[in-house]
Image: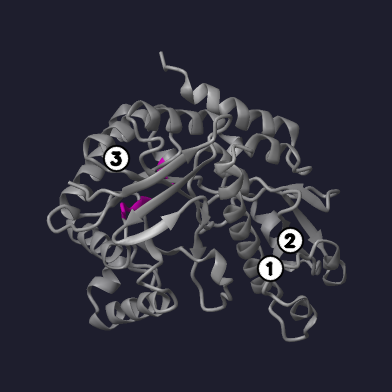
Amino acid sequence: MSNHIEFKKVCPDDDTLYVTKELRINGKNLTTPIKSLGLSSKLVLNDKIKGINEFYKKFSLDENLKKNSIYRVLGSPEKLSDLNYKFNSLVRKTDTNREINLCFIEYDDANYPEKKPLEFILDTAYEYSDITPLPIISNIAQRIDSEEKFAKYMKFLKESLEIIETLNHKPIMGIVPPVQFYIKDIVEFYAKKGIDAFVFDFDGKTPLSMPQVIRSFMRSLKENELLENSFIHSININQGRFNKEANVVGAKDILSFGLGFDSMGERHKPLKGPKEFFEKLKNRKDNRLRLFNKKDYGYYRLGVSEIDEIYPIDSIIKRESFGSENSDLRSLQKNFNLEQTGLEAIRLREIISNQESKEYLSHKTQVKKEDFKKIIKMKKEVSQKHT
């Protein structure tokens, strides 16, 4: 059986699915909403937003893929040592007495992993996590297109839990892929196993582009009395795409908190689209940045000389660092957006506790009216009994 998360205090909003929770996980306290931090060597973090970290590793069965081949790691003590060195280096960047760490492992192959690779994946996730996530299977939403294929996926989940539970002293995090037809069955399976932590994989899509899937997920949690009694994380959310004319687009990722998610993770999977588009993107000379403005929930496309118009006073990233010749602008952009979304998540805790979520969101001018309505409507639809 999975170890349980302790829910010390839960404050749901009356009008939306926004919620703030005070949790205790593996001996550490966590308050939501919160932005999870994807650890990297170039990350400069504001201490205020720290609390939960994640790192991500992709494995394949293909021995020709030197970097990701799981059998190359299993068959080489040197490569295994290198992998552990990398993970330990990331862990050393965190305060292990206070911060929650999550190690996500994606497995990319036409077949599910055999027992030895699966044991290795789960042992690695367990070693470096305070909540042990089950493995992510590449392209699983496209692969589960029949009852027979869904049965194979469920068999894989059962085998994974059997392996973890042989020696488990931590909560388990159930993976929830965006498969509309089978989400109810997946959540019920986890609920029967006593699992109260979940990660929803958006697979590179924006939260409000799949309202039926999210509704089904949240309703299934509610039906199993887990909507307010579980920790709900998300990964691989798309921020929202710019079109040719717009220099600002509404931030779609931050709206996930209004759909019931407690923690917003990083996007580890690359964007999908025609190869020609990404070639143009890679070769373009446009040096503009894409920065999040928490005042209006917009992502702004700006040149270095233009960012003063939205630059906040609470950023620890010095404005002049963007103008330095030696600056890595993409790393600065990532650090800035992590910080600002993290600070906004903290701000939301007070808004939710005061029952002001609906009014607060209505004043974010870059949130489209139809998106605002979807968030308000979602609360009512999830609360309705499913027939």
Q: Determine contact: label 1, label 2, CB under 8 Å.
A: yes
Gap in angstroms between the C-alphas marked 3 and 2 = 38 Å
| Magenta stretch bounds | 132-140
| Residue at far front of view | 354
Q: Position of residue 277 (x, y in %)?
A: 70, 54
Mark drawn on residue 290? 2
- Residue 209 seen in this snapshot: yes
Q: Are discs 3 and 2 less than 8 Å apart at CB?
A: no
Q: SS class of the residue under badge 1?
A: helix
Label 1 belongs to which residue?
333
**What crowding class fits label 1: few (fewer than 14 Cα within 10 Å), some (14-19), or many (20 or more)?**
some
Please state the horizontal and vertical placement of residue 91, each as a whole percent of the image.
39, 74
Rounded to the nearest angstrom, the CA distance separating label 1 from label 2 is: 7 Å
Indicate the position of residue 379 as horizontal and vertical percent values: 54, 28
Label 3 neighbourhood size at 10 Å, few (<14), some (14-19), many (20+)?
some
Would you say 190 lies left or right of 91 here?
left
Q: Amino acid at mark 1?
A: Gln
* Camera-nearest residue between 371 and 56: 371
